[in-house]
Amino acid sequence: MFVFDAVICNTDRHFGNYGVLVDNKTNIIKGVAPIFDNGLSLFHYAMDDDLKDIKAYAKTRALATYPDFTQFAKKTMSKRQKDMLRKLLEFKFKKHLRYNLDDKHLKIIEKFINDIAKELLSE
């Protein structure tokens, strides 16, 4: 979840919007629940001026639970997550027929995702 939040620049992850799956009979935690509440991600509130330097803008986004996306994510990454991140090095959005941001905005976010994946994979 923390790696995904770093990739999408989700500024709203807090202790009330993630969960675990629990066995109802034993009350034992079975795993992490699917990720939800990503509405404040992918530079949702960014204006055109903010997009001119998306990396600088991303650094201004205050996080609810930890101080830095990449440093925290790097500390929690598994080999499986690193393998999945490699697929994002050349990520491109597939445009929806009706619901899209403009091409310029999408290209900027694609580049951010490519760059953050590269940064997370670096030592």
Image: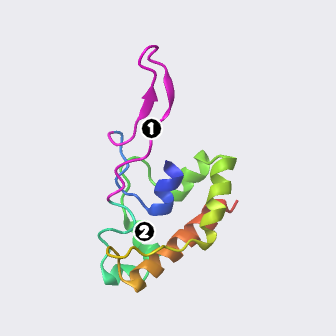
The label nearer to you, 2 versus 1, is 1
Other residues around mark 2 within 10 Å, as few (<14) / some (14–19) / many (≥20): some
Q: Is residue 50 above or below residue 121?
A: below
Q: Quadrant of residue 83?
A: bottom right
Q: Is residue 18 magenta?
A: yes
Name the amino acid, label 2. Ala
Image x and y of residue 95, in percent: 43, 76
- Magenta stretch, main secondary structure, is loop
Identify the residue shown where x is 34% and y is 43%: 17
Identify the residue shown where x is 38% and y is 67%: 60
Q: Quadrant of residue 15?
A: top left
Image x and y of residue 62, in percent: 36, 59
Specify whether 119 is left or right of 60: right
Other residues around mark 1 within 10 Å, as few (<14) / some (14–19) / many (≥20): few
In the rendered image, which quarter contains the C terminus?
A: bottom right
SS for dot 1:
loop
Q: Earlier in the sequence, mark 2 or mark 1?
A: 1
Please state the extent of the stretch shown in magenta in the rendering. 16-39
Identify the residue shown where x is 66% and y is 63%: 86
Q: Residue furthest front?
A: 97
In the rendered image, which residue does mark 2 sit on? 58
In the rendered image, which residue does mark 1 sit on? 33
Name the amino acid, label 1. Ala
The answer to whether residue 68 is seen in the rendering is no
